[in-house]
Amino acid sequence: MKLLAVKRSLLLGVALAAMMPLCHAEQTINLMQRGTGDMGVVVERATGSLQIIEHSSDTSLASVEGLGDLSHASVVFSRDERYAYVFGRDGGLNKVDILNASIDQRLMQAGNSIGGAISADGKLVAVSNYEPGGVRIFDSTTLELLVDIPANYGDGQTSKVVGLVDAPGNQFVFSLYEANETWIADVSDVSEPVITRFEDVGAAPYDGLISPDGRYYIAGLFGEDGLALLDLWYPEKGMRKILEGYAEHDETLPVYKMPHLEGWAIAGNLAFLPAVGQHKVLVVDTRDWTQIDSIDVIGQPVFVMARPGGRQVWVNFAVPDNKYIQIIDTEMRSVVRQLEPGPGVLHMEFSARGEEVWLSVRDEDRLDIYNTDTLERTASLPARKPSGIFFTQRAHRGGL
């Protein structure tokens, strides 16, 4: 028994000795020694920088410079929440280590890009491009180019790609603006990607979203009143138009900023969507995708986003009304409160359980934080021309 105890002691000592260099290395790498679950990043568009924040105590932690043109930047996260992949308008793909507040890798992958997505297994990062049109897919660890999908259509033409989202089964879904098409790229085997094309989906699809359960992809149409719906459980049925002619009885207004379909404001069986060029939020029954109501708002909605839990929908607006936020009660289907944070409210991001929301107030170089129960501002932080706000919780949600 004594010999056995000695052997166990020796083995434990060897194991601990083997672990010590690893622990020391981790302490060297993870300078901040913190979890990432309450962290996030804010895009500072004018300076090409990223501010790293945390929302437990509503503080700014660090800033990362040198990320290029972030005038229309978007962000996705690695599954461990450590890395933020930042897609710049200049075609730059940046992999940022948010624990070390540093650029891990930067790659100029195209001339003009509009967004990106990360695959369900976290191993692939896809970028949608305006110039050259198409989608490029990279290894999320090394940023090695694995798949290049040109958006070719017609007689040698190439389209801008918009509305790129990840879908279950390591698929990416996206739309071709000039081609009036939507494609599914199945890259479960990156050596043999399978492309499924849907033609004539509607005039000028400009953005796309996917439902939280990963089943439905919707393309917004800029060239006509309506949207195009694809059921990813039954792609063989093709895409169909929904909400056709929703604005046929309304005055035609100039579009000052394209609405974004990100956020999926869903409460129960209802979806709340921005109407293109109208001062309205559309209410849709997701059981049959018919419009059942519309809600008048102060201006042209850009983001229509649901507070977690679904009781509220928060709406921001294009110019000249972009200093306002309106809050819709989803049960009453009406605006119940109007806030005026300041000029240039570009983006909103809710904490995971919805107790607070962060707003970027670009024209006053500020981030505002609101309590979603009292609807009062609880804190503000300085930021240089902030736009997109992205919390690491997105790493575990499809389509964001």
Image (cartoon, rainbow, N blue to C red):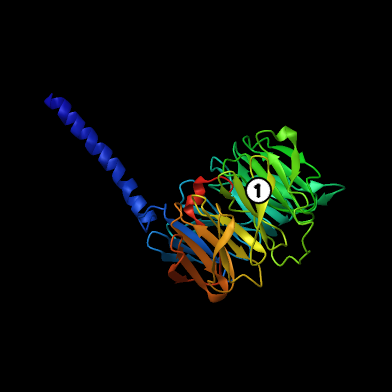
Pick out the residue farthest to the right.
155
Q: How many numbered callouts?
A: 1
Q: Nearer the viewer, residue 120 or 124?
A: 120
Q: Nearer the viewer, residue 39 or 312?
A: 312
Drawn side of residue 389 relative to residue 239, left or right = left
Please indicate, yes or no, whether residue 173 appears anywhere in the rendered image.
no
Q: Nearer the viewer, residue 51 or 146?
A: 51
Pick out the residue farthest to the left.
2
Give the position of the N terminus as an image quadrant.
top left
Q: What element carries label 1?
A: strand
Residue 245, x across and y down, in percent: 78, 52
Residue 127, x across and y down, in percent: 64, 51
Drawn side of residue 292 relative to residue 75, left or right = right
Residue 20, x across and y down, in percent: 29, 46
Drawn side of residue 149 relative to residue 374, left or right = right
Pick out the residue farthest to the front.
332
Residue occupying the point 71% across, 67% down: 256
Q: Mark 1 points at which residue?
A: 284
Residue occupying the point 66% across, 37% down: 232
Circle 1: residue type: Val
Give above or below for 241 relative to 304: above
Please indicate, yes or no, whether residue 22 appears anywhere in the rendered image.
yes
Residue 363, x across and y down, in percent: 57, 75
Pick out the residue farthest to the bottom.
364
Report crowding for label 1: few under 14, some 14 to 19, many 20 or more residues within 10 A (C-alpha): many
